[in-house]
Image: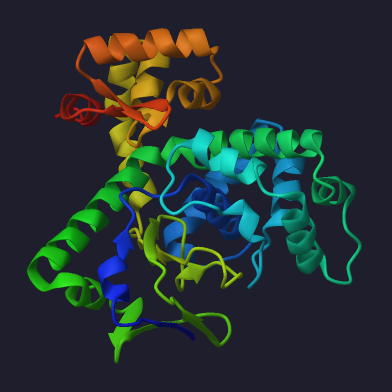
């Protein structure tokens, strides 16, 4: 069981992520491919993704990624730096910025007394080339195993966030936490939830971020290092048959492809969460200039909006784009 203790002011610092997280989706989906958790819900997805990875020639790449994030109680924290970071560029930039010393420590812990594979050994040494290969592997895996299901993922995340917002507005932070039952239990100033081993995490004034994940199953997940900014990733629990529902919606997607053209339709489909122009380019394997042109056309049509976030410009579907995508 995991216990998270709250101090006097910690409830006021509680944060609910507005989106899912790119790297958490990558890691947790890789783990789902290695186990049989929630078989009724995820086995159709497992079969389809395995076939798609084979067609794309990504079996060896995926196995190498699975070596880094096994279906086990421990995987390296550097792979999941986000707290609701949906943009692939931001998520991967954080991974690539991991200090070499931390890479060595976490990979040493991962492999223990086992021989470290050559790729992981080069990664542990902090080589830029090894990090770039990791980035490429993650992007290629995500494009096959996660990106095609973005619409279903976004709907689940949006529904969850709406429910959390209602709980917070009507009952405050304690009502919000109570609303997570049965995954989480809120009692006596602490969260309790299932976990693969007994663990206590104290916040000590640090804000806890709750992040929803479509690929999280059985129990919530947190970072292994208690000194890192605390995050708790919790299951969304899609219903059995979600993949068949997504397939029925693909008829609308085919009509959209004919209307907008395949590339712009795929760009619109990918922008259920904020993404930079370079993120669009990487996801759709376009040049940055081409991605920028497609984003401009979609923006002029009112299907996406663009806004500045720090030094980057992010794009996201508008209500009109959402209605067109769903065939409303």
Residue pictured at 21% horizontal, 11% vertical: 301
Q: Is residue 189 left or right of residue 98?
A: left
Say how many tags the image has: 0
Between 219 and 221, the residue placed more toward the observer is 221
Residue pictured at 45% horizontal, 70% vertical: 220
* Residue 281 drawn above or below residue 168: above
Measured from the top left, where is residue 153 in percent x and y? 36, 46
Measured from the top left, where is residue 32 in percent x and y? 56, 59
Measured from the top left, where is residue 213 in percent x and y? 41, 56
Residue pictured at 11% horizontal, 73% vertical: 171
Q: Which of the 4 image quadrants contains residue 86?
A: top left
Q: Is the C terminus in the top left, top right, bottom left or bottom right quadrant?
A: top left
* Residue 23 drawn above or below residue 165: above
Between 174 and 205, the residue placed more toward the observer is 205
Q: Is residue 49 left or right of residue 152?
A: right
Residue 180 showing in the rendered view: no
Q: How is the image coloured?
A: rainbow
Measured from the top left, where is residue 3 in percent x and y? 44, 84
Between 299 and 41, the residue placed more toward the observer is 299
Q: Which of the 4 image quadrants contains residue 299?
A: top left
């Amino acid at each position: 069981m995991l216990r998270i203790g709250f101090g006097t002011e910690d409830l006021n610092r509680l944060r609910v992520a507005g989106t899912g997280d790119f790297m958490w989706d990558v890691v947790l989906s890789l783990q789902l491919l290695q186990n049989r958790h929630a078989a009724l819900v995820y086995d159709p997805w497992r079969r389809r993704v395995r076939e798609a990875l084979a067609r794309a020639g990504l079996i060896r790449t995926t196995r190498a990624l699975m070596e880094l994030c096994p279906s086990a109680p421990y995987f390296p924290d550097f792979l999941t730096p986000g707290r609701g970071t949906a943009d692939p560029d931001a998520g991967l930039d954080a991974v690539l910025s991991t200090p070499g010393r931390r890479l060595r420590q976490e990979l040493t812990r991962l492999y223990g007394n086992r021989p470290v594979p050559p790729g992981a050994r080069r990664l542990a040494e902090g080589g830029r080339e090894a990090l770039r290969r990791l980035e490429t592997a993650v992007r290629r895996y995500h494009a096959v195993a996660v990106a095609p299901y973005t619409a279903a993922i976004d709907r689940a995340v949006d529904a969850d966030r709406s429910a959390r917002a209602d709980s917070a507005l009507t009952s405050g932070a304690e009502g919000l936490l109570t609303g997570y039952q049965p995954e989480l239990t809120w009692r006596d100033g602490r969260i309790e939830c299932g976990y693969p081993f007994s663990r206590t995490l104290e916040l000590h004034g640090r804000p806890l971020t709750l992040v929803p994940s479509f690929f999280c199953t059985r129990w919530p997940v947190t970072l292994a290092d208690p000194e890192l900014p605390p995050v708790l990733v919790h299951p969304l629990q899609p219903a059995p048959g979600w993949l068949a529902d997504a397939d029925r919606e693909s008829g609308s997607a085919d009509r959209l492809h004919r209307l907008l053209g395949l590339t712009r339709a795929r760009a619109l489909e990918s922008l259920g969460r904020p993404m930079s122009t370079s993120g669009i380019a990487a996801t759709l394997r376009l040049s940055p200039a081409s991605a920028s042109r497609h984003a401009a056309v979609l923006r002029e049509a009112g299907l996406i909006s663009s806004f500045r976030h720090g030094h980057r410009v992010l794009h996201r579907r508008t209500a009109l784009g959402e209605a067109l995508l769903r065939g409303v």
